[in-house]
Amino acid sequence: MESGGGGSAILERVATLLRASGARLAGCVRPIRGPLLIAGVILAAMTIAGYCAFIVTHPEHSWLSPVDLQVYRMGGEVVAHIRPPYNPALASPLYDWPGFGLKFTYPPFAAIAFTILALPSWGLLPELWLGVNIVALVATIWVTLGGLGYRAGLTRLGGTLALAAVLFWTEPVQRTMYLGQIELVLMLLVSWDLCQPERRRWQGIGVGLAAGIKLVPLIFIPFLLLTRRYRQAAVAAGTFVATVIIGFAVLPADSRAWWLDGLLFKSSRAGFTGWAGNQSLDGLITRLSGSISAGEPIWFVAAAAILIGGVACSVAVARAGHWLMGVLACALTGLLVSPISWDHHWVWIVPGVTVLFCYGIRCRGWLRWAWLFGAVVIAALFGAWPGALWGQPQDLGGFSEGLIWWPPNTDPGTFLRLGDRPWYVEYHWRGFQLVAGNLYVLTGLAVLLIAMALAAGITVGRRRKASARGVGPEPSGTARPGPPRRPAARSAR
């Protein structure tokens, strides 16, 4: 009981300091506007110059190998009946196409959305998509800062550029750009949607569209329901259902194969779940179990526990007034429980580090350094450290950046040819290899456990306050489930 009281007292102190430091920050916006903007521009320029220098001095396969973008484009070409890859003789032209080693593994609506990628020539598309990803990175940070209560202006622009310059060099971001992935764009869509004012009529549409392209964002629908944003949850669910209906209207055979014949449950189509690149709970358990079949029963139980605990945690944090923290806890839960969470899916560290940093500058004393330390540690653990630092061979084409690639790993093509085999190197990691090779999922589990402890402390503290006032427990959801609001600017003292 004593430990619970101490924890709730600390959490109440955190909330008080956040409110006080938010007011202090509001009064100091004007004096730091110029220096922060200058620093952001300088850091962004250094990042652009460094990346351009790397491009000029290295072969293209070292910084761009857009195989995933090619799969997206192929899906769009099937919808547009462009030969090849469209083959009308196939029962399911989208999913029966043999591909080039990688098959289309997304819902039918995703292929419909990807028809836009069939418009530019392939010679132009990879570089164009690279630019889209960079814009999505910067825009996500801008939207996140807005969700935290920062007004549009030079201060917010400077902070956006500075954070983007640093987070650009994280492995999930670099890997997304390298493969031509869509993760940054989907993250922007969800972040923009959930950072909108609660009164916005169509809030939830971004979540529904993102879920229609990749299913994992569906986890935000129960989150919205449990935080009593019923209209937003209905919009998200309705939008998702609309994507399914559109898929059946445009691609009936493929939609039947995906939704009714169980194709969406065949995670093996996406690749080897025990591969080092799969940083999900399923990937961790598979590697420790020694085979896919041995790990599945354990994963079902563990994933159910993490799903329930993670969603409950995110709801509790959001109800306590820390809306973005709740959103990020929900996103983290989705990354952990999804059967496949490739390394580039972890781009959610971008808004995560942004929120930790902003909470740090709003707090005082040891709490400030705790938040800032967390932001620095996560950015470092997910950094795109060059494999040459530990003699790592370039066994992923030209890409070996990041600590998770320190241990040896299986060629993904081997699994596609042979299926699961007990001699895959991931099954035989030892010592530090187990830590480095599972770094993202271990970090995610640690962060979620900390968040669960904080959420439990918040709940206990609120109940004790209600009991001290001699009234019943405060109903959940009475706190406004939105980002911390900054008061009107006042003169700094």
Image: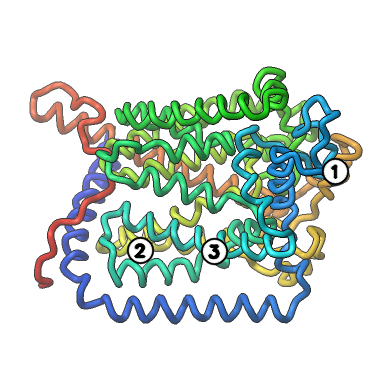
Q: Is residue 368 above or below residue 77?
A: below
Residue furthest right as drawn = 418
What element does badge 2 sit on?
helix
**Rendered image quadrant of residue 76:** top right
Which residue is the site of mark 1? 424
Quarter occupied by the C terminus: bottom left
Front residue of this view, candidates 428 and 231:
231
Residues packed near mark 3 inside 10 Å, few (<14), some (14 to 19) or many (20 plus): some
Q: Nearer the viewer, residue 476 or 422?
A: 476
In the picture, residue 312 is in which quadrant? top left
At 54% from the left and 64% from the top, the residue drawn is 134
- Tell me whether circle 1 and circle 2 mark residues in contact (CB < 8 Å): no
Tell me which numbered mark, 1 or 2, is placed earlier along the sequence: 2
Q: Position of residue 32 (x, y in %)?
A: 25, 76
Image coordinates of residue 455 in percent, x first then y, are 34, 37
Cα separation, mark 1 vs mark 2, equals 42 Å
Quarter of the image where one finds residue 393: bottom right
Q: Nearer the viewer, residue 160 or 130?
A: 130
> Which residue carries the number 3 mark?
134
* Location of mark 2 (residue): 369
Q: Are marks 3 and 2 in contact (CB under 8 Å)?
A: no
Vertical relation: 283 (above or below) 378: above
Q: Amino acid at mark 2?
A: Trp
Residue type indicated by callout 3 = Ile
Residue furthest toward the top?
Answer: 260
Residue 300, x across and y down, in percent: 63, 24
* Disc number placed over residue 434 in the picture, else none: none
